[in-house]
Amino acid sequence: MEMVGKMSKKSGIVALSRRALLTGAAAAGAAAIAGQAAAQTAIDELITAPRRGNWDDQFDAKASRTTAAVTSNTPMLSANNFIYMQQAITEYQTIVANGGWPQVNPSVKLKIGAVDPSVQQLRQRLMISGDLPRSAGMSNSFDSYVDGAVKRFQARHGLPQDGVLGEFTLKALNVPADTRLMQLNVNQQRLQEIMNKQLERRYVVVNIPAAYVEAVEDDRVALRNTAIVGSITRPSPTLDSKIHEVILNPYWTAPRSIVQKDIMPLMRKDPTYLSRNAIRLIDGNGNEVAPETIDWNAEKAPDLMFRQDPGKINAMSSTKLNFHNAHAVYMHDTPQQGLFNKLMRFESSGCVRVQNVRDLVVWLLKNTPGWSRQEIERVIATRVNTPIALTDEVGVHWVYISAWSSKDNIVQFRDDIYAIDGNAQLALQANIGVETSAGSVEDDILPQ
């Protein structure tokens, strides 16, 4: 792929057949060297035994254990990536002109060890998109090369890298090439609009469809964190601002919409809900009001502040990142760390929850005197609400980029979760129930 990338820079267009030939030749050479090195091993004897069944392709155990790196320390919003995006569009135009790629319709669940005629369709599909070298050949066997190629494909599409053709992997494989080309063109326009802005030397970017956060300094990714972003019915907005404040052990104040839609029904079912979750009612004079004095069956919620004390069960847990914006959204920690392991991380009411947020806090405060990692951890342990003004404000940009490309012609796609790219096939998860039910988590989602 590196050789193809260099030729793309020189000529602007690379013929599909020539690109595949070069990629296949490189992979074949690597496979030959690996085969010589392993020739005397017990595993090689086992693989080459007469009774090995239908494993009639080359086998490289290493390919089954590793996935080609598709991540980069080049920021997604780097100006260099706009050039790679143009190259990707040219290549996908060639793919479309040559007839695209086949649909994969297996009769069995495809994973390593499977034998099915549809594996030939899968091999062809992965070869055309550059995930599988031509030297892997054509057969009905799902061998380790196909396993490695599927994992690479999954990594490029933000899917779990398990090498199994599950529901979303199969759906992503069967998005037609011309639809992917359209997605690249739509996102190139979005990138162009962003490139027209002056990005800061230090900034944080939230890519909503990818559900991750990048901390960028001098055009290099310093941190990349998994995120939870807004659901389909409560989407996260795109915005540009500056992070001016970090709050350790924040209070959580429930927005009026959450109080009306979620807390009122919860209190009707369980009058102890507020006290169990350390949520206090505060009037306009700063006085606490007893929940027992409120009519929870009333049509409208009381005109009071619903404020949760700092602590482990606080909806924002240890940290809140503040920046001025018209949407009243922010970034924060969460007590529900298990949510970051989910494929569909579109569960908030618009705010963004950040995994390993303390690493991001250390990076944000590195130019603010007196706030080492040790001091940050000490203050968090006290459970005392502590606002910290940043000495130098850090840019923050929430963007909606569902397709992009980086060096080595690594083209990335993500689910168009908010269905704004222009084709229903790109919103693979849109029909799945990702809206969090009432009473599940923070402001974003309520504590239980």
Image (tube, rainbow, N blue to C red):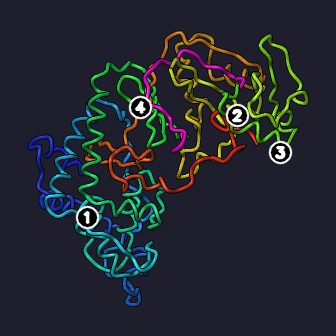
Write down the quadrant of residue 330 in the picture: top right
Label 2 or label 1, whichever comes before in sequence order: 1
Q: Is mark 3 on a helix, strand or loop?
A: helix
Question: Vertical placement of 306 versus 263: above or below?
Answer: above
Quadrant where the C terminus is found in the figure: top right
Pick the residue in front: 210 or 14: 210
Q: Mark 1 points at which residue?
A: 127
Q: Mark 4 points at which residue?
A: 221
Label 1 or label 4, whichever comes before in sequence order: 1
Label 2 or label 4, whichever comes before in sequence order: 4
Q: Name the residue under label 2.
A: 260
Q: Do the residues labelled 3 and 2 touch (CB within 8 Å)?
A: no
Q: Nearer the viewer, mark 3 or mark 1?
A: 3
**Distance from label 3 to label 1 (Cα)?**
56 Å
- Which numbered disc covers residue 135? none
Instruction: Say whether residue 313 is left or right of residue 146.
Output: right
Q: Which amino acid does label 3 sit on?
A: Lys
Residue located at (45% from left, 72% from top): 111
**Distance from label 2 to label 4 (Cα)?**
40 Å
Q: Which amino acid does label 2 sit on?
A: Gln
Write down the quadrant of residue 134 in the picture: bottom left
